Image (cartoon, rainbow, N blue to C red):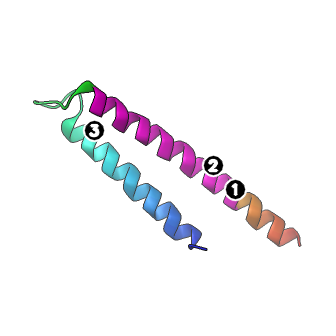
Amino acid sequence: MTDPQTVIEWMDRRMWSIATWLETFGRSASKPRPELDIAAKEEDLRMFTELRGAYEKALAKKRASEAAA
């Protein structure tokens, strides 16, 4: 299994990359990308944020059950 910290760091890098793309090419850019691209990146950012939260919650639950055992 991949180290949990590595997975969290990977998700953080993905979210940072998407946020940077949105800042550079989003609606407020001088030449924004098509709305479909912007909406897809916003959805990706929401998805990764939700996944990271669920992953951390599951990881905490696993560690609690291991500590209780």
Expressed as whole percent of the image width and height from the top left, the position of residue 66 reads: 81, 71
**Picture quarter containing residue 59?**
bottom right
Give the residue pinned by disc 3. Answer: 22
Q: Amino acid at mark 1?
A: Ala
Q: Earlier in the sequence, mark 3 or mark 1?
A: 3
SS under mark 2? helix
Q: Classify residue 8 as left or right of residue 63.
A: left
Where is 28 relative to 62, above or below? above
Expressed as whole percent of the image width and height from the top left, the position of residue 20 reads: 27, 46
Residue found at the very far left of the displayed protein: 30
Expressed as whole percent of the image width and height from the top left, the position of residue 67 reads: 82, 71
Alpha-carbon distance for marks 3 and 1?
29 Å
Residue 7: numbered disc: none
Q: Check contact, mark 3 vs mark 1: CB within 8 A.
A: no
Alpha-carbon distance for marks 2 and 1?
6 Å
Q: Amino acid at mark 3?
A: Leu
In the image, the segment drawn in magenta is 36-59
Give the residue pinned by disc 2. Answer: 54
Q: Check contact, mark 3 vs mark 2: CB within 8 A.
A: no
Q: Is residue 12 magenta?
A: no
Residue 58: numbered disc: 1
